Image (cartoon, rainbow, N blue to C red):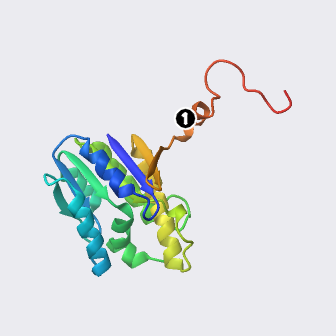
Amino acid sequence: MIILVLGGARSGKSEVGERLASALAEPVTFVATGMAADQEMAARIAAHRARRPPGWATLEVGPGEDLALVLERLSGTALVDSLGTWLAGTAGWAAGAGSGLGDGRGEEGLGGAAGRSLGDALASRGGDTVVVSDEVGLGVHPSSPAGRSYREALGRLNQQVASAADRVLLVVAGQVMRLHRPGELAEVAGLAGPGRVHQRGD
């Protein structure tokens, strides 16, 4: 089972990810991608750590580490929190920020490449995986080229992981919605099944 949990800042997505992982098979490994760059971040990391079950293991993925390779080596359930901080800390991103990586030209760029690699790793894992990521469309519009390039890269990364996931959830104000694939739109809209679709003017 692969579950992608998306949400904006302070949406409650991390708590949802933790609840989901708690319901899956043990052992559970929390894959932490955020580093304590200042006191505020350190406090947030400590708060996250304090609410995790004591039996969980924690594995920190530092800047430049291959997240796909890390996940392939893990057994049991993995909870990744989050893709946004991992992407921001990768060596490739640091070297290419603002220089066209993930800038929307086709599916190439850091976001697309990382997403394909990560999707393959998730699909090949023996255990379940919960992946938490930032929904960049809910944030403030970046004012710098580097910020816009990062947003494009993370958006592409999210799409690649979503395509590999069995379930995609969106968290808003602590409330959870299940998202549907494009192929399910007819069913969601009530257009599937017997009967005819009424066209405008019928």
Q: Residue at x 44, y 76 (%)?
A: 97
In the displayed structure, 102 sits above or below 189; it is below
Q: Residue at x 43, y 45 (%)?
A: 168
Most extreme residue toward the right, as rendered?
Answer: 201
* Mark 1, residue position: 184
> SS at mark 1?
helix
Residue 18 placement, left or right of 134: left
In the displayed structure, 33 sits above or below 128; it is below
Is any part of residue 158 visible from this angle? yes
Q: Quadrant of residue 76?
A: top left
Give how far across and how far down residue 111 sits, in percent.
44, 62
Give how far across and how far down residue 35 sits, in percent.
27, 73
Residue 119 placement, left or right of 135: left
Looking at the picture, which amino acid does disc 1 mark? Glu
Q: Residue at x 55, y 59 (%)?
A: 106
Considering depth in this image, is 146 or 6 the residue closer to the camera?
6
Give how far across and how far down residue 198 sits, in percent.
77, 27
Quadrant (top left, top right, bottom left, bottom right) of the C terminus: top right
Q: Residues within 10 Å of mark 1 (few under 14, many from 20)?
A: few
In the displayed structure, 190 sits above or below 150; it is above
Give how far across and how far down residue 96 sits, in percent.
42, 76
Considering depth in this image, is 39 or 73 the residue closer to the camera?
39
Most extreme residue toward the left, as rendered?
Answer: 55
Considering depth in this image, is 51 or 34 the residue closer to the camera?
51
